[in-house]
Image (cartoon, rainbow, N blue to C red):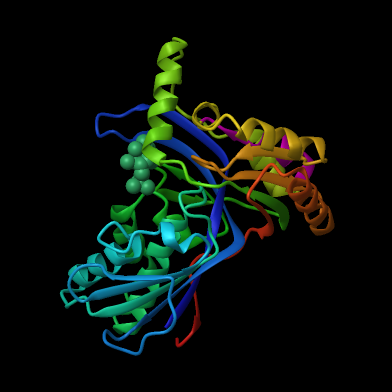
């Protein structure tokens, strides 16, 4: 059972003050893009393929990871796909026997929800493998317990998330929109970026207030207006990501210089996202970023795309 699952970029990430539970209330406009991981679930004990790394993620669940920065993905209980399989088995009242193989293209700790994507894919794959047939809403509830971005990886498209980001409403979107992602060497820790955001605001005496959705962004999405969308992109975590990784300022500047309609840090970073006016312009912008030597890799993608989808074995 193989499930394909997209990365996300945050078109708007408005962050409120820290809550008592350590999270922040968000207005989080998610957009799923055509950069995919694949998760294959098979019966525990089935034949092994070649793998960059493998491990046993707790009783009855084994995991192998191949592809983009596979060596940086944890193979123990910290692996979100392993936790997803175990959580689903618990909810279904069955033993969690499964072998997971994750093929990564989404950058690890890159601000594109790669770990959440793998968790979402594991939920869908194990639900099918085990013949559970749980409704999508139930998978979303289990996903929300695993991480704030997991429900969106199940849903896909373009949607606004409130609360921790897990309460989703789809947004009308006249895409496709064309993107370039500049991948960095080494990730950023999401909790560290949120903490730095709080610290910078406190030092500046800023009161963020309640996060609110940008009406300009919603209108640009509905109209399919890439230029207006580029101007409306906004990420409250960007100053914190730039403080922790100052070199990202040069990446954003290079993209703007080469004609991006909008440029921002994706989520908690360090991946930088650039909006282009067409697929061709995205390709030439990616080439210009590579030539400028400001990033480890530059990849193109389009959005919106569907959430976690069974591609074989279903
Ligand atoms: O929910 P998830 O495990 O993906 O969140 C990772 C970390 O990001 C949290 O531990 C928290 O530090 C931060 N976070 C936050 N507010 C949110 C979502 C995430 O502070 N709404």
Q: Any magenta on residue 233?
A: yes
Find the residue positioned furthest to the top: 205
Q: How many marks?
A: 0
Which segment did they paint magenta? 226-236
Helix, strand or loop for the magenta stretch, by majority: helix
Asked which quadrant contains residue 234, the reply is top right
Q: From this viewpoint, is residue 225 visible?
A: no
Pick the quarter of the image with the N terminus.
bottom left
Asked which quadrant contains residue 126, the reply is bottom left
Image point 36% across, 60% down: which residue? 140
Q: Position of residue 222 (x, y in %)?
A: 69, 48
Image point 47% across, 29% down: which residue? 211
Quadrant of picture, ligand 1: top left
- In the displayed structure, would residue 192 be above or below residue 157? above
Pick the quarter of the image with the C terminus.
bottom left
Q: Position of residue 190 (x, y in %)?
A: 41, 40
- Of residue 219 and residue 58, the one placed in the foreground of this image is 58
Left/right placement of residue 249 relative to residue 152 reads right
Left/right placement of residue 21 relative to residue 3 reads left
- Of residue 142 and residue 249, the one placed in the foreground of this image is 249
Left/right placement of residue 195 relative to residue 243 reads left
- Of residue 156 and residue 243, the one placed in the foreground of this image is 243
- In the displayed structure, would residue 103 be above or below residue 270? below
Q: Position of residue 247 (x, y in %)?
A: 61, 33
Q: From this viewpoint, is residue 110 visible?
A: yes
Q: Any magenta on residue 302?
A: no
Image point 49% across, 30% down: which residue? 244
Image point 57% across, 58% down: which residue? 157
- In the displayed structure, would residue 123 be above or below residue 14? below
């Amino acid at each position: 059972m193989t499930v394909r699952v997209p990365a996300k970029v945050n078109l708007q990430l408005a962050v409120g003050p820290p809550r008592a539970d350590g999270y922040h209330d968000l207005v989080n406009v998610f957009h799923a893009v055509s950069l995919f991981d694949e998760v294959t679930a098979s019966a525990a004990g089935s034949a092994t393929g070649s793998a960059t790394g493998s491990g046993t993620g707790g009783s009855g669940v084994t995991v192998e990871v191949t592809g983009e920065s596979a060596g940086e993905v944890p193979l123990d209980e910290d692996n979100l796909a392993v936790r997803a399989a175990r959580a689903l088995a618990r909810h279904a009242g069955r033993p969690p026997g499964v072998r997971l193989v994750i093929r990564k293209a989404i950058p690890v700790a890159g601000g594109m929800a790669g770990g959440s994507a793998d968790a979402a894919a594991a939920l869908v794959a194990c639900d099918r493998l085990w013949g559970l047939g749980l409704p999508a809403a139930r998978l979303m509830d289990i996903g929300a317990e695993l991480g704030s971005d997991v429900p969106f990886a199940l849903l896909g498209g373009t949607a606004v998330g409130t609360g921790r980001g897990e309460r989703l409403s789809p947004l009308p979107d006249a895409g496709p929109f064309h993107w370039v992602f500049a991948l960095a060497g080494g990730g950023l820790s999401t909790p560290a970026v949120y903490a730095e955001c709080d610290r910078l605001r406190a030092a500046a005496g800023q009161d963020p207030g309640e996060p609110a959705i940008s009406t300009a962004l919603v209108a640009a999405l509905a109209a399919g207006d890439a230029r207006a969308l580029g101007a409306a992109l906004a990420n409250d975590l960007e100053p914190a990501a730039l403080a922790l990784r100052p070199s990202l300022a040069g990446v954003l500047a290079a993209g703007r210089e080469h004609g991006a309609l909008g440029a921002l840090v994706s989520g908690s970073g360090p991946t930088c996202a650039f909006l282009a006016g067409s697929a061709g312009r995205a390709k030439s912008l990616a080439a210009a970023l590579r030539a400028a030597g400001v990033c480890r890799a530059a990849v193109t993608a389009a959005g919106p795309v569907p959430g976690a989808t069974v591609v074989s074995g279903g």
